[in-house]
Amino acid sequence: MTGTGSEDGTWLRPITAGGTPLLTRAGQVVYASRRLSELVQGRPPGITGHQWSSAIREGFDQVVCAADSGRPVFAVEIAPPPAAGSPEQRAERMKNAVCAAVGLEVLRIESPTLRGADHGRRIVEYVIDARGYADAASPEPDSGEQPTVGFRDIIGRLPDGRSGHVNDLGALARAAAVEAYVNRQLADPIIRGLHVRWKNSPAEGWSWVEVRPGRCLLERVQLWDQRFSCGVDPARLAEDLAALAVGERLRDLDAAEPLLVDRDQLRRDLRLLAGRRDELDGGFAFDHLCAD
């Protein structure tokens, strides 16, 4: 967008005061609950007055800024998926248009269970670390060096003492499922899942665990990485976030009981997803989950 100031961030307003930061990490400062009007210096070219007046009332759960300048680096929003054609969906489109015009990177996580106030800090810390690791681990172009192991694939000691992927946001949920199974609260100890990436659309992750014989607790997360690099595969991150959401619901199985999904219905839904593989970036790699 030549001439809009989006490329060098001149439309973004530095945050230099106004509230205690949520955290400081890796040369970046994180603020909670900021409106778009606090981040943008005036209506940028190409944005209508209606888009502007609608968008500036919208906000983000966390905004990550450079510690030295206070200028926003990226923003994170965690919200339930809006209904098609709803005012919430229209407001989100307006906000996306303004963010694109000013070059603000945005990570939007759509989940019926995850919440910014409860999970935002952990997710932001993870993304900051993943992005920093990816920058440091990437070999120089034409160097001939092989990429190092990815952030999500690092093996270490998990909180329960086992060895596993220490940068799996669903690790605690997976350990909780095993414990619940030992205590005869679940029919199966394994949180299963899949991840896909829709062409020109979000990444999507599913995770589920069988709570009663033939009855599953299912979570689905969509992840929109708008002009944004997560530092890890966004589809894989969406699956991990879905596992994290499963873990939240395992805390109160009595409340989750009425919302369990029939295992046969889940399998039908998986087959419908597999049938749309032509719409997926990279296809569908989980046919084994569709078998009887």
Image: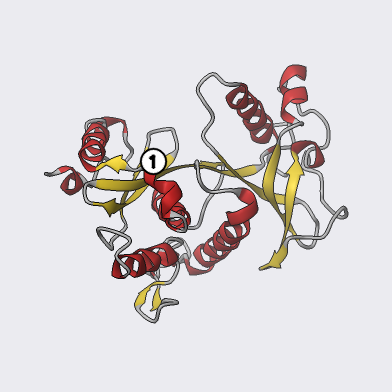
Residue occupying the point 72% across, 28% down: 55
Residue 150 visible at all? no
Residue occupying the point 22% across, 47% down: 214
Q: Using the image as rendered, state which of residue 247 and residue 259 is in the foreground.
A: 259
Q: Is residue 183 left or right of residue 87?
A: left
Q: Colour scheme in the image? A: secondary structure
Q: Is residue 244 left or right of residue 16?
A: left
Residue occupying the point 53% across, 68% down: 136
Q: Position of residue 6 (x, y in %)?
A: 70, 38
Crowding near pointer 1: few (<14 within 10 Å), some, many (20+)? Answer: few
Q: Position of residue 67 (x, y in %)?
A: 76, 62
Q: Amino acid at mark 1?
A: Leu
Q: Using the image as rendered, state which of residue 132 and residue 277 is in the foreground.
A: 277
Q: Quadrant of the N terminus?
A: top right
- Asked where in the image residue 191 lies, by quadrant, the reply is bottom left
Count of all numbered marks drawn on residues in the image: 1
On the image, numbered disc 1 is attached to which residue? 259
Q: Is residue 69 left or right of residue 61?
A: right
Q: Position of residue 169 (x, y in %)?
A: 46, 61
Q: Secondary structure at mark 1?
A: helix
Outermost residue, left side? 292
Q: Using the image as rendered, state which of residue 226 and residue 182 is in the foreground.
A: 182
Outermost residue, front side? 254
Q: Position of residue 13 (x, y in %)?
A: 81, 44
Residue 273 visible at all? yes
In this picture, is 67 found above or below 104? below
Q: Quadrant of the C terminus?
A: top left
Outermost residue, right side? 17
